[in-house]
Image (cartoon, rainbow, N blue to C red):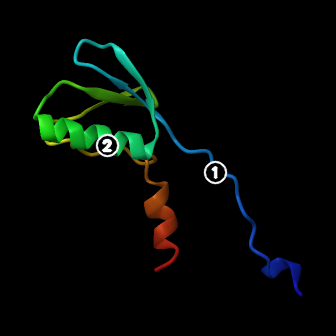
Amino acid sequence: MNKSKIPVLKKIIPQVTEIFTPEGKSLGNANEYELLDFLAQIKELKIEGYYCMYEGQKLIINKHGKIKRPPKGFFDLFDILYKRLI
């Protein structure tokens, strides 16, 4: 068997972001799944003012649970890898 044709199982460390209250109190770090759950809660409760940080940039979460124009690199690994399959 040609060794160059053997796939490598890569260890990928999940990305995290720190989430903050409107008052600036840290709620802790969240991985992608935890962030999605938090965004869903924001939408369901229709609350505003929460935000997360990414590479020193403050990303505001609106009352619809959306982050407008998330920067490149912010939890986009799934999309990048998935596009390799299609």
Label 1: how many residues lie within 10 Å, few (<14), some (14-19) or many (20+)? few
Tell me which amino acid carries mark 2: Asp
Q: Which mark sits nearer the N-terminus, 1 or 2?
A: 1
15 displayed left or right of 36 = right
Q: Which mark is residue 38?
A: none
Looking at the rendered structure, the secondary structure element under dot 2 is helix
**Residue positioned 36% across, 40% down in the render:** 35
Classify 64 as above or below 47. below
Q: Which mark is residue 37?
A: 2
Looking at the rendered structure, the secondary structure element under dot 1 is loop
Answer with the quarter of the image where residue 6 lies.
Answer: bottom right
Q: Mark 1 points at which residue?
A: 12
Percent from the top left, x then y, of residue 43?
A: 16, 41
Label 2: how many residues lie within 10 Å, few (<14), some (14-19) or many (20+)? few
Quadrant of image for the N terminus:
bottom right
Percent from the top left, x then y, of residue 31?
A: 46, 40
State which mark lies toward you, 1 or 2. Answer: 2
